[in-house]
Image (cartoon, rainbow, N blue to C red):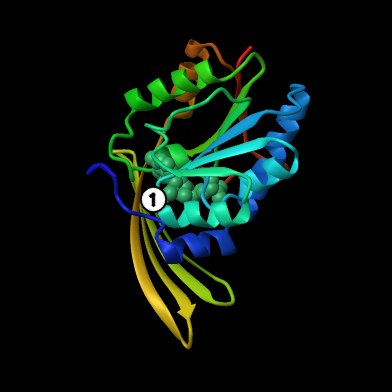
Amino acid sequence: MPKSITNAYQNDLAYIHDAGFGQFAKNAAAEVLKCLRQNRVGDGLVVDLGCGSGILAEAISAAGYGALGFDLSAAMVALAQQRVPNGKFRQESFLTAALPPCVAVTAIGEVFNYLFDARNTNARLTKLFHRIYDALPHRGLLAFDVATPGRGGKTGRQRNYSQGTDWACLFTAEEDRSRKILTRDITSFRKVGEFYRRDHEVHRLRLLNRTELAAQLRDIGFRVRTLSGYGRVKFPPGYVGFVARKP
Ligand SMILES: C[S@@+](CC[C@H](N)C(=O)[O-])C[C@H]1O[C@@H](n2cnc3c(N)ncnc32)[C@H](O)[C@@H]1O
């Protein structure tokens, strides 16, 4: 991995994300499948950028599409490969992933915001959108969601916790409004044998502007629709979804 890459979603947090936060990807998968059907795209390959533990890939694959996932986290890639044995998963940044011809590209769960790959800038994201456009056929789709300014809530600071049967997680999030950066500090506890193992990760996300993203996608040639949630589940403040269609 190049020097610009930060290791994140290591074993315990990858496990916890999969065990405790998977519903979001399930809802997103239902939305993506609905959009594919509406566009009469019945089969073909779906490329999932920041595929995590393969929850969307599993749904896509069960519906008869091929699944190819890219993620920077080795632990996530291993979980995805276990979950979807007939899918293909690679440990690679979405910025450098080679995109084969495909019917849809997805990036679910703030993937484009993360600064785990320090090369993630507006210019690199624009290049990626061009490459996605070129990989898609007529009626092909790009579906993703991002965090926008305001993600840190009214005060710009949040503290929260979450727990499952064999894990617990404590988070703080702090939004730097002038630099448009959200920093999440995550302490996790996962039961290993008799005891709980403690781990700690810091995630930095650059907050993206909804209007600029929509304009950028339209300039490339996409028809763009924004989403306020997946299905009936609405996004929190400071969050937006996009379905961009190649005409
Ligand atoms: C919040 S998780 C969402 C995972 C999955 N899409 C889901 O919805 O369950 C964000 C994922 O993006 C991945 N990620 C962040 N930056 C990335 C990059 N530059 N290239 C590939 N994956 C990246 C992380 O490793 C993590 O698995």
User: Which residue: 58% across, 49% down?
Assistant: 54
Which sits in the foreground, 105 or 235?
Answer: 105
Secondary structure category for the residue under label 1: loop
User: In the figure, 67 relative to 165: above or below?
Assistant: above
* Residue at 67% over, 49% down: 26
Residue 46 is at least partly visible in this image: yes
Of 59 and 169, which appears nearest the observer?
Answer: 59
Residue 150, x across and y down, in percent: 44, 42
Give the residue displayed 73% in from the left and 44% down from the top.
62
Residue under label 1: 156
Q: Above or below — where is 171 with respect to 175?
A: below
Locate the N terminus and report the quarter of the image it occupies: top left
Q: Is residue 190 above or below residue 159?
A: below
Residue 33, x across and y down, in percent = 72, 35
For label 1, the crowd category at 10 Å Cα-Cα, with few meaning under 14, some 14 to 19 and many 20 or more, is: some
Q: Residue furthest left?
A: 3
